[in-house]
Each structure stands twice: as structure tokens, then as C-alpha cells.
Image (cartoon, grey):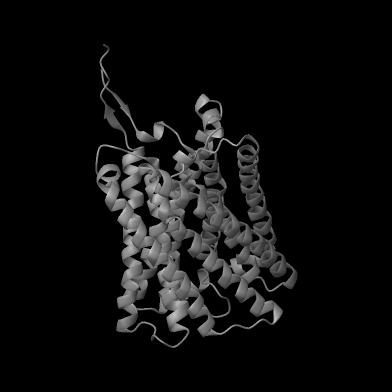
Amino acid sequence: MSTLTRPADRYSPLYFLASLGAGGTTVTFFLWLYFWVKHPGQPVPVFEDIAAAFTGGGALMKAMIVGAMAGIVFFAFHNVRLLIWNLRQLSQFKRTEAYAQLRASNAETQLTAMPLAIAMTINVGFILGMVFVPGLWSVVEYLFPLAIVAFTLTGILALSQLGGFLARVKTDGNFDWTANGSFAQMLPAFALSMVGVGLAAPGALSHVPLTSGIGIMLATFFMMAALIVGLVALVLGIHSMLSHGAAVESVPTIMVVIPILTVLGILGMRVNHGLHVNFEAHGTAAEVLMFLTKTYSVQILFALFGVEMLRRVGYVRRFLFGAENSVGAYALVCPVVAFGVMTQFWINAGLVQAGLLAKFSVAYWILTLIALAAQVMAVWLVLHLNRRHFGKVEAVPVPAE
């Protein structure tokens, strides 16, 4: 007799990436409001700015705002829902033998997907507040210290998990090089960078020098930690792949450099803004453009490399459309989201601010199509993977010998 089952029933901490992907897609919709709705008086759009743009705007502006808000609500709901589901599943998973085996293997770093997803959900919470809560900006200075505490605690969790893993492999010396044919060990760097960009938000937005300074210094700490961990993991991954080949199910992690660079790029811009507003440090539009262009260039190179690796192992055919399922497929969402986000920043904070591109011109919209195409792909990936992994399918039992 056949039963109904689903791939997600075989739990892995990497399912936190499902929550992360939904949260990242939420950000892509918020960027519509961030770059296309005027927000005088503060560096981010809030409920009052959106309401004014909707009231005084034309049909296209109204449609854009409705689409952005609908996308934010839909994917924020899935972000929170999947985070709660993962926390419950992880609690049960910790009582199994599979968890003990994970803690004794290279895969122990998968546990840092939890603080990574938590940090993203905190960011999503602020997006929901800015977009849907009237008068939020009048009390935001009271919220920034709470955000600093929340992100710092999340960062401590990530550092604790990473420290436990490093202490084990350094003392026991049982790191499995043959099972490291990917950039999966860069996941802790991703978590640390996500914590850092969250801490950089109060650093950039607060007008209280003490709050801003604490946010900037903590963000810088986690940025440096992410860079060190990421560079070491990058070298280890390349060494293992050259020696033992790529691990097929982990091939999507080759593009994890893309979201890390996007997050660190936004972190750097937030820190620079906070230094400008509160500490008399002034940068130029040309410097921002070059910083974003360098970051964008590295992302394009890793995207080309990653796509070629996916093609060579037939990953899309096997794990997106074939009979096989891998939770690692969720690692495809973050690079797509991050590439679209960085494209938006490169266009709006780089080309437009430097005077190389007129905002809302024909050329502007042609380039913006790149970001929108990445966003469409991210939406499709989230919905498609959720359907494959969380939708019930009929399992055919294996007959007894």
C-alpha cells in the first residue's frame, strides 16, 4: 500500500534556506518602493511616503505599489512560516542519531543556516514595519537599540556554532576533504555577513551618534569575521574540488559568493552613510560607483562559473525537473536574489547617482529588466522548490525480497 510523503520529511538544517529564500524575495519587492517612491526626510520609504505616492501617483505608480506590497506580504508570510517550521523540526531532529552524525561531520556548519535565517527574518520584520505601520519613524530611535541587541545575539549564536565546529576539526583532525567538493563551508560566512548588514542598518539610519557608532563598529566586526571565514572556506573548497571533484548535490553553493558580496556590499554602503551623517566622513558618488562596479564584476564571474558547473553536472535537469530532490537546491535562490538586488543598487546608487544614467529613462528601464528578470526567477524558484519539497507525493513501497 502506497503512502503520501514529501522530501521535507527527511529533515536537514539546510531547509532554513527555504525561509531565507522567501525573506530575500521579500527584499526584492521592497526595493521597488526604496528606489521608485520618493521618501524625503529619511533615507528609506515609510508608510506615509508610500501612501502619498499612491494618492498622488498615476496608474503605473499605483500598480507598482500594490504589486510591491502584495509581494512583501506574501513572501514575508512564507519567510516567517518556514522559520517557525524549521525551528520546530530542528528541535525534534536534535534527538535523532542523524543529528549526532551531522555534528561529527563536515556538515556541522549547516547549523549556521539557523542564525542566517533568523537574521533575515529580523530584517523582514523591519521591512514590514516601515511599509505597513503608520508613524513608525517617529519612534524608530527606540527600536534601533533593540535591533542591535537582536542581531548581536544572533551573531553570538553563529559564532558559537562556528567555534564549536572549528574546535572539533582542529583538535580531532577529522575534516573530510573528499566530502568538501563545494563552497558549502562558506555558509557560516554568509550567516556572519547577514548579521553584519543587520547591525549596519541602525548605524546608517540612527541620528543618535552613540547608537550609530555601536551599530557601525559591531557591523564592522562581523564583516571582518565573514571575510576571514569566507576566504578560508573559499580556498578549502577550491582545493577539495581540484583534488576530488565537485560534490554534485552541493554544486549550487559555488555561487554562494554572490549573496555574500551583495550583503557585504550593502553593509559597506550603510556604514559609509552612517559615517557621513554622524561622523563627518564624506564619500563621493564616483567612489560608490566604483565600489559597486567591482562587487558586481566579481558576482558576474562567479555566476558564469556557477552556471557552467550546474550545466556540466546536469543539476537543473536532475534536481529541479527530474525525479531526484536535494535540499541543496534552495541554495540556488540566494544567488539569484542577490544578483537582482546588486543590479538594482548598481543602477540606482551607482550609475544614477554618478550622473551616468538618467533615472526612469529608456536606458534605465532596459538595465532594470536584468534585475526584474532575476526577481522573476527567484519567485519561480521559491514557489517551485516549495512545491517539490513540501508538497505531498505518492511514495511507492519497495517490495520485500
Q: What residue occupies the far top of the structure in this picture?
A: 401
Residue sitting at x 72%, y 65%: 214
- Tally of numbered tags: 0
| Quarter of the figure with residue 244 | top left
Q: Quadrant of the N terminus?
A: top left
Q: Of 174 and 212, which appears nearest the observer? A: 174
Q: Of 295 and 170, which appears nearest the observer? A: 170
Left or right of 183: which side holds 43? right
Q: What residue occupies the far right of the structure in this picture?
A: 210
Q: What residue occupies the far bottom of the structure in this picture?
A: 355
| Vertical side of 146 occupied by 370: above or below | below
Residue 132: tell me if it is visible: no
Residue sitting at x 33%, y 84%: 361
Q: What residue occupies the far front of the structure in this picture?
A: 243
The picture places residue 281, in percent across and down from the top left corner, at 67, 81
The picture places residue 93, in percent across and down from the top left corner, at 52, 30
Residue 62: tell me if it is visible: yes
The picture places residue 16, in percent across and down from the top left corner, at 48, 44
Q: Quadrant of the C terminus?
A: top left
Residue sitting at x 36%, y 56%: 306
Residue sitting at x 47%, y 50%: 239
The picture places residue 141, in percent across and down from the top left corner, at 68, 67
| Vertical side of 128 occupied by 84: above or below | above
Q: Of 169 and 148, which appears nearest the observer? A: 169
